[in-house]
């Protein structure tokens, strides 16, 4: 049984913990190793290492930090297949999905390589006569990243670490305790690229040790991805301890499907959006509000196209739907399906007990699942399932559909399928969704634009990625300077505002 180690100050160390997390291959159900629940002292060690590394790294020129991240990017490309296999084996994403996970880590790294340009401040000569003001952006110190199970490469090493350290900060990553291998391997690549020891540190631990991170005075900020209840608690505790925080949380993304949509292509997009990554992503399309005039045709086409979505081992390139990532959540998804049935939703595609290749019967597989005629009083259509479950809500027209969508407490993303420019524009303007798709089922912008969830899908002021990320990981400093001429050098009185009015 392989026992993973934690990564502190540039080396892997054996944990002294008595508590271990079993790691599984979700395609087979087999236990593949154990990750430590690091002790409180080990978490403190990681914070101390990050603090010690900060002064030197902060004083490393932005251009030099950028050059190191260029090397990280090269290594991510060089090891693409290896990292993709790791994601498949520990998370359950299909090969193409896992490659995209790693690709998004590369994309976030590319954003980080632009640090010399994006860290530039602003200046104004003669802001007041003879007084010049310059605004700089400076790092803060140690940040902590708290990572979920669903994107082992993209979230820690696309959304969090690259821009954080490009800005001159250091980081302690709390990797997902059930999917830590990819993060640990990428940490090795960071070291190979020349990232100094202590700049990146990785632990796996419980909420007790996370509280240590949230309360520690040397940790200046928290970036979190996970559930809404946990994200809200982390945001509140971070604020209470004087830390900046961004908490990206859960969703129940809706699409509005109008009668003028390109039906077959729309259904293909919905299938990809709803069932891709096993529905285990905060941008999964969980609900379609379908105009009643085409609802029967839409459901019929959906059932037809779903027949080609096969379940199988994640690394098999012919597989279109991989397993749920871990056993406990697998049973939770099944329980949610049962609850939808009890609530009275019409189960038109049943994903329980899907057919899988021989040898994978113990994997955590749930096939594409579709509920029709979901009404507002049913929790299946309003609360996140985080699995391959799609709900159909039938609506009369655009206005009813938009109102129904906006009534949901989450607002990560929202989508409209239509050929009408008018309705597309109205939708983009009035939807609550922070990321809007017009005939785009997963409206996640490229990493140069912030990932901007709204309502209970996000807590904080600055989102991850894009220019927001550079603002989050730095603070501004304004410097006003004035140089005396010979006459002023002799002055013995100074105006109350010292010339600044």
Image (cartoon, rainbow, N blue to C red):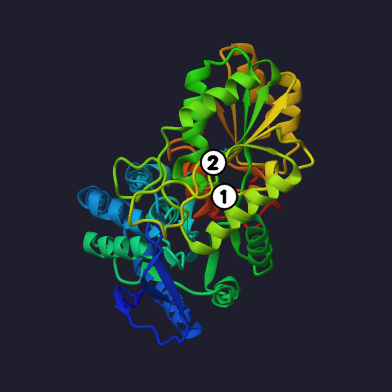
Q: Which residue is mark 1?
A: 386
Q: Nearer the viewer, residue 254 or 265?
A: 265
Residue 28 lies, with reference to residue 484, above or below; the image says: below
Q: Nearer the viewer, residue 135 or 250?
A: 250
Label 2: how many Cα within 10 Å (few below 14, some 14–19, many 20+): many
* In-image side of 286 versus 393 (left or right): left
Contact (Cβ within 8 Å) of mark 1 with mark 2: yes
Q: Quadrant of residue 104?
A: top left
Label 1: how many Cα within 10 Å (few below 14, some 14–19, many 20+): many
* Residue positioned 23% across, 59% down in the render: 193
Residue 449 location (% of width, % of height): 48, 37
* Residue positioned 53% across, 17% down in the render: 263
* In-image side of 457 versus 69 (left or right): right
Residue 55 location (% of width, % of height): 39, 69
Q: Which residue is mark 2?
A: 284
* In-image side of 344 versus 323 (left or right): right
Residue 260 location (% of width, % of height): 60, 12
Q: Nearer the viewer, residue 97 or 47?
A: 97
Specify whether residue 134 is in view. no
Which residue, as the protein is rendered here, is positioned at the far right? 377
Q: Quadrant of residue 207?
A: bottom right
Residue 288 lies, with reference to residue 23, above or below; the image says: above
Residue 310 location (% of width, % of height): 40, 40
Secondary structure beneath label 2:
loop
């Amino acid at each position: 049984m392989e026992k993973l180690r934690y990564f502190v100050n540039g080396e892997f160390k054996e944990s002294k913990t008595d508590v271990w997390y079993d790691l599984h291959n979700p395609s087979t159900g087999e236990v593949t190793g154990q990750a430590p629940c690091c002790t409180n002292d080990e978490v403190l060690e990681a914070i101390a290492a990050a603090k010690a590394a900060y002064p030197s790294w902060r004083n490393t020129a932005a251009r030099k930090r950028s050059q190191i991240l260029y090397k990280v990017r090269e290594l991510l490309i060089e090891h693409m297949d290896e990292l993709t296999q790791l994601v498949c084996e520990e998370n359950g994403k299909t090969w193409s999905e896992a490659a995209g996970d790693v690709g998004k880590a590369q994309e976030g790294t590319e954003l980080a390589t632009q640090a010399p340009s994006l860290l530039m401040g602003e200046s104004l000569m003669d802001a007041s006569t003879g007084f010049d003001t310059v605004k700089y952006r400076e790092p803060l110190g140690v940040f902590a990243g708290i990572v979920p199970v669903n994107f082992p490469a993209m979230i820690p090493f696309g959304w969090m670490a690259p821009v954080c350290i490009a800005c001159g900060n250091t980081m302690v990553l709390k990797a997902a305790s059930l999917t830590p291998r990819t993060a640990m391997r990428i940490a090795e690549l960071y070291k190979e690229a020349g990232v100094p020891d202590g700049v990146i540190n990785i632990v796996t631990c419980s909420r007790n040790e996370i509280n240590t991170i949230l309360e520690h005075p040397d940790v200046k900020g928290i970036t979190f991805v996970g559930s809404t209840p946990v994200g809200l608690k982390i945001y509140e505790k971070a604020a209470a301890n004087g830390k900046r925080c961004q908490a990206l949380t859960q969703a129940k993304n809706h699409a509005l499907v109008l009668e003028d949509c390109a039906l077959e292509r729309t259904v293909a997009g919905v299938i990809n959006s709803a069932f891709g990554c096993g529905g285990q992503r905060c941008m999964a399309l969980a609900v379609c509000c379908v105009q009643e005039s085409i609802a029967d045709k839409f459901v019929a086409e959906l059932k037809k196209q779903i027949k080609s979505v096969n379940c199988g081992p994640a690394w098999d390139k012919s597989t279109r739907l991989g397993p749920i990532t871990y056993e406990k959540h697998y049973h939770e998804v099944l329980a949610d399906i049962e609850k939808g049935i009890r609530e009275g939703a019409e189960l038109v595609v049943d994903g329980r007990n899907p057919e899988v290749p021989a040898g994978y019967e113990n994997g955590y597989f749930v096939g594409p699942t579709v509920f029709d005629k979901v009404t507002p009083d049913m929790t299946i259509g309003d609360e996140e399932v985080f699995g391959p479950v799609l709900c159909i809500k039938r609506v009369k027209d655009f206005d009813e559909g938009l109102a129904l969508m906006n009534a949901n407490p989450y607002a990560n993303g929202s989508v409209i399928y239509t050929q009408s420019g008018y309705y597309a524009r109205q939708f983009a303007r009035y939807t609550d969704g922070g990321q809007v798709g017009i005939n785009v089922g997963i409206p996640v912008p490229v990493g140069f634009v912030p990932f901007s969830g709204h309502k209970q899908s996000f807590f904080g002021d600055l989102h991850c990625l894009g220019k927001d990320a550079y603002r989050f990981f730095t603070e501004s400093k304004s410097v006003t300077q004035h140089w005396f001429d010979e006459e002023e050098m002799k002055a013995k009185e100074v105006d109350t505002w010292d010339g600044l009015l």
